[in-house]
Amino acid sequence: MSTIQATTEKRKLRNLSDIRLFFHRNETPIYFISATNFNLLGIDEWVHGFKYITYIDSFDGQHPNLFCPAEIPHQPFTSIEDINNYLLEHKEVVDFIRSRTKDSSAGAGKVVFLFFDEQTEKLCKQLDLEISFPPSKLRTEIDNKIMTTRIGNKAGIASVPNVLGKVTSYAELRALTHELGDDLVVQTAFGDSGHTTFFISNETDWNKYAPEIINDPEVKVMKRIRCRGAAQEACVTRHGTIVGPLMTELVGFKELTPYRGGWCGNEVFADAFPHEVRLQARDMTFRFGEQLRELGYRGYFELDFLRDLDTDQLYLGELNPRVTGASAMTNLAAFAHADAPLFLFHLLEFADVDFDLDVDALNERWADPENIDSWGQLVIKHTADSVELITEAPKSGIWRMKTDGSLEYVRMQTHRRTVENEREAFFLRIAKPGDYKYEGADLGILITPGRLMTEDFAMNNRAKAWTKAIVDKFQSRPLQPVETHAAAQVAEVANFKMM
């Protein structure tokens, strides 16, 4: 243990300056292990010794704090957990972690994930890595749409009118939901980005989705409402729940995703919702976080909300007990630069150091529209029902849109910090030359200042122009016969949540 670290650990951190200095002087190796580093873009600039270990190198070796090992033979991945476990067993990763272990008696450092399971926990224990998140068992228990509804009910937070129960036939569905009307939304306990959200108005709809519904011991059936989505990230600490800004959600836009209910981006825009709605969402998120604390959960989480356009009622949607695809929006925002990124408070909660924190004052400051700058992100997937081999792909970094709508590459950059105006954007490439482009495959994420939606929450022309220009940068060719089987296997097993 270094002298600096030993000195810091003996004293309590009493304000934000102390907290920032603590991480600036950090000597404990900290890793984010995932498919890409998208979720925690920029955190390495706040935390000394923070490294990304990823399966995909979006930066072609140019990121100073990203380690991506050479690919070795492996079973097809069916989840992010599979990718993380593959990385933890990779010899190059093991050697990299051991090379940075300064004091074996203090362990190999700390690690955070987007997703992990019990196998991940075993591998981390073998490497003497401490996971800075609640146990996988607890996360799995609460990362469940049925459990989320019940936690919300206990905290006094309303969900869209719903019933919970086992459904094995269309007749059972109608008998269970006769008070909810003809148009229903069915959600299974686990799933993401619209993959397991089913819109059912008649028996034909039921027959289409029944195989994915009847096997669940319990599903959530909701009244279908006209709504707009919102998201809010927060962090449960020993001093209370810190709440980030309310963000709009881009959902189901055909230019970005093939999934009708699929998440495909976010906006941070203070005036997207009335002041009273923002206050209501903050209160709901705070109360939900305090309920999570009673269950033993601490650290980062995100809530989805649904705002009923007919009644103006704000409803609880889903819980994500982790960092999410919206985390780059939260942690790179103006208020984060003024104080500290929300994720730093997550790391602090697991840092084995005592600290003071005025959560109420922080929440008030972060809710002030003056401290919220306007940014948006587009999560771009391949939307066509086709499979091709990518031959060219745009680089990660800063891009500028020319007057004719085409793009020019400005420079390599690791996140959005040097984007100057709405004619520029940061692009994070996910799919590279040599990858297969199949329906639902992630191509990349584009982050730019300004609005991406109209006042009616439709995708605006600027967002469409950026999407088209980026998609046009991906060149591909039809598959050769010898490639068809391999591509089909990739498309079948790889269409899981990457973010």
Image: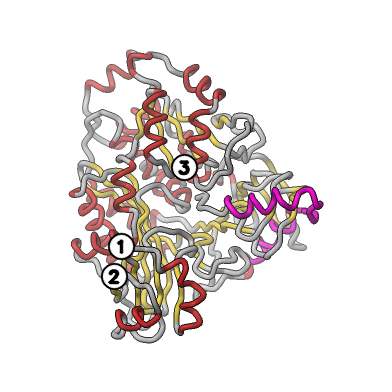
Q: Nearer the viewer, residue 448 or 429?
A: 429
Q: How many labels does the image show?
A: 3
Task: Identify the residue under disc 3.
Answer: 81
Name the amino acid, label 2.
Leu
Residue at 30%, 74% in the rendered image: 162
Name the amino acid, label 3.
Glu
Give yes or no for contact between labels 1 and 2 (Cβ–Cβ under 8 Å).
yes
Element assignment for label 2: strand
Is 3 covered by the magenta stretch? no
Give x and y (percent) for residue 352: 26, 28
Give x and y (percent) for residue 41: 50, 42
Q: Nearer the viewer, residue 385 or 401?
A: 385
The residues bearing labels 1 and 3 have C-alpha atoms spaced at a distance of 22 Å
Q: Would residue 133 appear left or right of 256 to someone viewing this image?
A: left
Disc 1 residue crowd, few under 14, some 14–19, many 20+, Cα 10 Å: many
Give yes or no for contact between labels 3 and 2 (Cβ–Cβ under 8 Å).
no
Residue at 69%, 45% in the rendered image: 432
The residues bearing labels 3 and 2 have C-alpha atoms spaced at a distance of 28 Å
In primary-sequence order, the first of circles 3 and 2 is: 3
Task: Identify the residue under disc 1.
Answer: 146
Res. 25 visible in picture: no
Q: In which quadrant is the N terminus drawn?
A: top left
Is 489 covered by the magenta stretch? yes
Can you tell which quarter of the image residue 492 is in?
bottom right
Q: Nearer the viewer, residue 78 or 252?
A: 78
Can you tell which quarter of the image residue 75 is in?
top right
188 above or below 13?
below
Task: Identify the residue under disc 2.
Answer: 164
In primary-sequence order, the first of circles 1 and 3 is: 3
Element assignment for label 1: helix
Give x and y (percent) for residue 435: 69, 46
**Magenta residues, start to end:** 464-493
